[in-house]
Amino acid sequence: MDDPLIVVALLLVAASATAAVAVRDPARQALVLAVLGTVLAVLFTVLQAPDVALSQLAVGSALTPLLIMLSVRKVRRPQRKKEAER
Amino acid sequence: MSVFPYLVAAWVFLVGCYGLVTSRNLIHAVGCLAVCQSSTYVLLLAVGYRDGATAPVFSDLKPGSRPVVDPVVQALALTDVVVGATVTAVLLALVLQISKLHGTVDPDELSELRG
Amino acid sequence: MTRRTRLLVAALGGTGLAVLLVAACFDLPRFGGAHHPYGDRVVRASLARHTANTIASVNFDQRAFDTLGEMSILFASVLGTVVLLRQTRDEHRAAPEPEQVALPVRRFALLVLPVAVVTGLYVIAHGQLSPGGGFQGGVVVATALHLLYLGADYRALERIRPVGSYEIADALAASAYLVLGLAGLVAGTAFLANFLPYGTFNTLSSGGTVPLLNAAIGMEVACAVVVLLARFLDQAVEIEKGGEK
């Protein structure tokens, strides 16, 4: 494979995926997942798949991180309330 | 390297599985599942790629003038991306319910089955 | 099973899986190879049906039945989320406190919102011509509506997003897809067959039923994502534990 652009995009995907798993705090993981979504969209564009890249960009960089952040907020609220009551 | 994209897809999948197994927070585990899903998209699109080809869209391309990549795998990956996000939403809703019922999202503390 | 035993089993299984995966990778056809028999046939069929976007032809014409399955997965997951995140008897709704938004952010969000919605509708409408279609455009429209949440506050978002109407519209769009499929049966061919005339290549009226199915899926995906985000936002912002007040 003689296209260095594809190699760079693949390495970025591997790096962001490893980072998304290594970050243990879910709120920060949501941001790393947004980065992973954008890097995947770049990889899909370079692999000549603009349809999939459009889909991935809209979903992976906005929707999934937003859902994760809203869940983190909902899960943390009663725990903070319990600490406030003590 | 003609197998490098497949190896990257396998690496991303294994990294996601490792994250799932060693996770201490269910929301983090759902994020690792999303990473596993993205590895399948990389594998699908890598299978369909053709050297020197362009996207299979003929709105600005004269049909037959250039080779195009395989559109079948792109169609599979396309619907998969959106549907995968909604399934992630269902899993997160389940995690919210677990946190409401048991007060924790640590999978190690959820070992007993309670009514 | 203790945590250490679980990790040991996972390590063993993971190593075995890794070895098998790497061995399989070396058996796959070379990356970038020129042998794609299904791809060539699909491109020929799509050009014969006057659809410029081959992927839209695969999704909504040649394999429209699979897209029906995907749409039902989407519908079922939205249904599951709505049921799981409904307000229970021991919870109440607390009005969220409005937060001051910086003026540049407010102006930018309110300026970009109509542009983004129109872009999403454009992507849905031109799905059979250029990269785009119901799935992508639907997500763009749904997330564009939530720019109002960023630029104003939750109360303003609730005004342009009556959740009940979006749920009805979601169900209507899913039924529209089915009705278009049944129309193919009634027209004398097969379920989800492309029975409309194919039209002129590379214009908006080409591809037969592809633009209609695109519109149905676009409406379905947009309403589904809005309902999903509405339920999650309600849980995170409004609903709190505590008896009826």
Image (spheres, coloured by chain):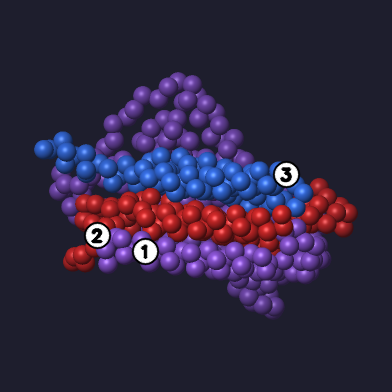
Residue highlighted by disc 2: B110
Separation of marks 1 and 3 at Cα, in angstroms: 38 Å
| Quarter of the figure with the N terminus of chain B | bottom right
Judged from this view, the residue extending furthest toward the left is A86
Please tell me the numbered disc located at residue A4.
3
Residue C102, position in %: x, y? 42, 22
Q: In the rendered image, which quarter is residue C213 located in?
A: bottom right
Callout 2 touching callout 1 (CB < 8 Å): no
Query: Looking at the image, which residue is at 56% across and 59% down?
Result: B10
Query: Looking at the image, which residue is at 66% across and 55% down?
Result: B4
Residue B58, position in %: x, y? 79, 53
Q: Which chain is purple?
A: C
Callout 1: few (<14), some (14-19), or many (20+) C-alpha neighbours within 10 Å? few
Regarding residue C220, the answer to whether it shows in the image is no
Q: The red chain is which one?
A: B
Query: Label 3 amino acid?
Result: Pro
Q: Nearer the viewer, residue C24 or A74?
A: C24
